[in-house]
Amino acid sequence: MLTVAGHSQSVYAGPKLRFRPPHEVQKMPTTDFVFAPPAPASVAIAGSAQRFPVRRIFCVGRNYAAHAREMGKDPERDPPFFFTKPADAVVDSGANLPYPPLTRNLHHEIELVVAIGRDGSDIAADAAKDYVWGYGVGIDLTRRDLQEDAKATGRPWDWSKGFDQSAPCAPLVPAADAGDMTSGRIWLAVNGTVRQDADLAELIWPVAEIIAACSRAVALRRGDLIYTGTPAGVGELRPGDRVTGGIDRLGEIEICIGAAA
Ligand code: MN
């Protein structure tokens, strides 16, 4: 006990403790990167100046029976399978995209995009909607000739799917405004001619089961996007094509394909 000015109090005798006041915490040194890290990839939000930061892009293969058949596969209800694109493959609606390199058969695939807003692993299908931030209209651009080569040779799909600007996405609509997205028209047109026209009710694996399956393979994080697969009617795009598409309650997407980069 130490007596100070007539008051007795216990005194801590260990190393001097120092708590940083909030204004000092904010000035703590940041990681010393060798160059400035790039801004995060992001996608627009409908009716908002804010943007949705994109962490990863997962995509589901062959999730509509008619599309599985057009790709020469039997659409039995096997577990969903996934492939990925880099986060910075995402590009806003309205973009003019150069025709990508290496391909002579660029294809369009219109897809419902799910934007994840909460971290989770081993998510139960009946809890999956709690992890959805919102939905969007996306196009999974595909270098089909490279994908066919990859399938034939047993090589990865990456170069056919994960190239630059391969994931156009319309402004996201919050789930509270969009609803559960278990049904609704999904369509795509090239130069005004409709090529893909289906209903989300035809998804072999609906959104809740896709989230459950993906979260068993990896820990989903907020910022992740999941492209949920395309209906039948995929086809070739050429330089100069104007591509439009939409999903009920989510609005529309538009991109133009330019000359080769
Ligand atoms: Mn696809």
Image: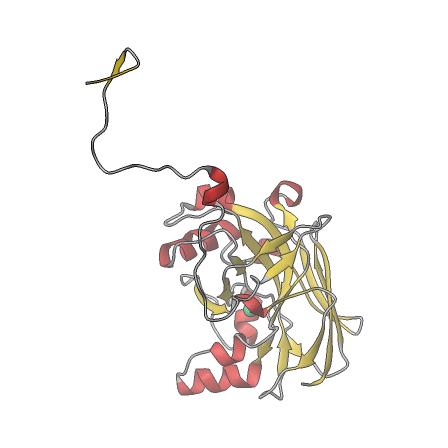
Q: Where 59 sits versus 47, above or below? A: below
Q: Where 224 sits versus 15, above or below? A: below
Quarter placement of the C terminus: bottom right
User: At x 60% / y 86%, what residue is drawn?
Assistant: 101
Question: Residue 105, located in which quarter of the rendered image?
Answer: bottom right
State the image coordinates of residue 50 (x, y, percent, origin top left): 66, 50
Q: Decide which of 48, 166 is in the foreground and name it.
A: 48
Question: Residue 42, located in which quarter of the rendered image?
Answer: bottom right
Question: Residue 194, located in which quarter of the rendered image?
Answer: bottom right
Quarter placement of the N terminus: top left
Q: Using residue 25 as the reference point, say whether residue 165 is left or right of it.
A: right
Q: Looking at this rendering, what residue extends furthest in the right direction?
A: 192
State the image coordinates of residue 114 (x, y, percent, origin top left): 56, 54
Question: In what quadrant does ligand 1 lie?
Answer: bottom right
State the image coordinates of residue 69 (x, y, percent, origin top left): 53, 72
Q: Decide which of 128, 70 is in the foreground and name it.
A: 128
Q: How many marks?
A: 0
Q: Looking at this rendering, what residue extends furthest in the top direction?
A: 6
User: At x 52% / y 54%, what residue is drawn?
Assistant: 223
Q: Where 244 sits versus 152, above or below? A: above
Q: Where 174 sits versus 112, above or below? A: above
State the image coordinates of residue 68 (x, y, percent, origin top left): 52, 70
The chosen color scheme is secondary structure
Q: Decide which of 34, 63 is in the foreground and name it.
A: 34
User: At x 62% / y 89%, what residue is drawn?
Assistant: 104
Q: Using residue 86 as the reference point, say whether residue 173 is left or right of it.
A: right
